[in-house]
Image: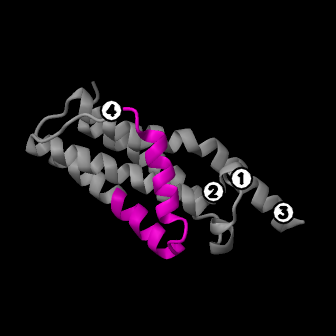
Amino acid sequence: MATKRELTEADDRGWATFIQTVESLNDEQLVEVGYYADEGWSVKDLMAHIGFWMTEAANMLEQMRFGTYVPRTGEADVLNKQCYEANRDVPLPIVRAECFAAHTRMCQELDALPELDSEAEEWFTESADRHYAEHQPRLEEWVGELRSRAGS
């Protein structure tokens, strides 16, 4: 099992890469549908999705800290759809702020845990560095598509 420091360092690297890629786009590009074109996702929707799962992780870590944690399973696809529907009309500045706030809170909740166990490690990594890494290849591909169109 990893230490809090190792988890935080992995998150720092993944978050920096994710945010640098996102912030390489202008506001028009961030809201342009095409990141997941079939599902109607823009990069703004991706930011809402990432922020949602970081909030979920923060909530689970908080519950672990207070001894009220109850594991949840099998609802990720339903929650992803609900997150998309709930955030699709939310303005970009709010989605951006919520994403950054969720990241901060998730990291604070990890730090506040008196002990790290495998469940806490899984919630954190699956919502942080592993999650960013899962989306990073398509994000970079989409950024490349947007840049090539802007350059022509």
Would you say the magenta stretch is mainly helix, strand or loop? helix
Q: What segment carries the magenta color? A: 73-102
User: Given contact means CB atoms under 8 Å apart, are the residues at marks 1 and 2 in contact?
Assistant: yes
Mark seen at residue 41: 2
Counting from the top left corner in percent of width and height, residue 110 is at: 23, 45
Rounded to the nearest angstrom, the CA distance separating label 1 from label 4 is 29 Å
At label 1, the amino acid type is Ala
Name the residue: 62% across, 73% down: 27
Q: In the rendered image, which residue does mark 3 sit on?
A: 149
Q: Which residue is mark 1?
A: 37
In this rendering, which labeled residue sits more in front, label 4 or label 2?
A: 2
Q: Amino acid at mark 3?
A: Arg
Between residues 100 and 36, which one lies in front from this camera angle? 36
Q: Earlier in the sequence, mark 1 or mark 4?
A: 1
Single out the mark in the foreground, 1 or 4. 1
**Between 142 and 5, which is closer to the camera in this rendering?**
142
Q: Secondary structure at mark 1?
A: helix
Q: Residues within 10 Å of mark 4 (few under 14, many from 20)?
A: some
- Magenta span includes 82: yes
Question: Within 10 Å of the Cα at label 1, are there few (<14), some (14-19), or many (20+) other Cα atoms?
Answer: few
| Residue at 50%, 72% in the rendered image | 90
Which of marks 3 and 4 precedes in the sequence? 4
- Secondary element under disc 3, as helix, strand or loop, is helix
Crowd band around label 3 with a 10 angstrom C-alpha radius: few (<14), some (14–19), many (20+): few
Compute the Cα span from label 4 to label 3: 39 Å
Q: Are marks 2 and 3 in contact (CB under 8 Å)?
A: no
Q: Which residue is mark 4?
A: 122
**Amino acid marked by disc 4:** Glu
The first of marks 1 and 3 along the sequence is 1
Asked where in the image residue 152 lies, by quadrant, the reply is bottom right
At mark 2, the secondary structure is loop
